Amino acid sequence: MQTAIIVRQNRNHIARTLRYLYSKTLKIYRIFSGHYPQTKEYMRGNLENSFVFLQEFKKDMFNTGAVLPSSRGLSKFITDIADLRQRKTVVELGSGTGVFTREISKKLSTEATFFALEFNKNFANQTKQNCPNVTVYNDDAKNIQKYLYSHNKKSCDCIISGLPWSYFNEIKQNELIDNIYDVLENGGTFLAFSYIQSSFLPRGIKFRKLLEKKFRIIIKTKTVWTNLPPAFVYICIK
């Protein structure tokens, strides 16, 4: 009984801390928005989804991986890199609330096959609501091959990841990368963003080494400073 009370108190403390940090973050962005147009753009594009992210982070921080959704700046950056007009089959892993999803669907040709996988049920529903024209599956990213088969595809030429890799243990990272590599066409591209601070964590370092071991070409892009936190993208070519 005493243990249960302590656990509940800890959860309440974490929740209060997160709410405080969240309110301060919004305050900082409002201040900066008067000086940096990019910040206004970030706020406008993400407020509608931010509260969903905060709630899910409080429930399960290790699978959510972020307190706030990605910025439009990051979504445009990663989808521009993907050269989506030339792609025939694209899969998004970890759609969150659909920030990347919306941008991907805009840039694909009408003949392309595209679907998203999202493990979190509330996020999957939010993506469906924000992107009604996109097929979204509420399932683990490791099952990517199953859903490619359901679309009569054996492989894809582009995979865009919004997964929190630095929160995954080594076994999970290996399993996902193996499955991703297996369904990616030769010459295909795997894109994964990472927060700057995450890349210095032990699991973030392991993820980078895993990519270097698996893929033929690895490129680390410039940092997108208008994202919160700032992020960069790994471009991985099979």
Image: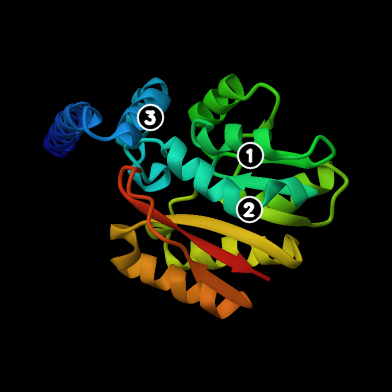
Q: How packed is label 1: few (under 14 Cα within 10 Å), some, or many (20 or more)?
A: many
Write down the residue under mark 2. 82
Name the spot of residue 79 as percent of width and height, x first.
58, 46
Quadrant housing the C terminus:
bottom right
- Using the rendered image of the protein, determine whether residue 70 is visible from the camera's viewpoint: yes
Residue at the spot x=54%, y=32% of the render? Answer: 98
Q: How packed is label 3: few (under 14 Cα within 10 Å), some, or many (20 or more)?
A: some
13 w.r.t. 237: above or below: above
Disc 3 secondary structure class: helix
Disc 2 secondary structure class: loop
Quadrant housing the N terminus:
top left
Name the kind of residue labelled 2 in the image. Ala
Name the kind of residue labelled 3 in the image. Glu
Write down the residue under mark 1. 104
Query: Which image quadrant is residue 170 in?
Result: bottom left
Name the kind of residue labelled 1 in the image. Ile
Name the spot of residue 223 as percent of width and height, x first.
37, 57
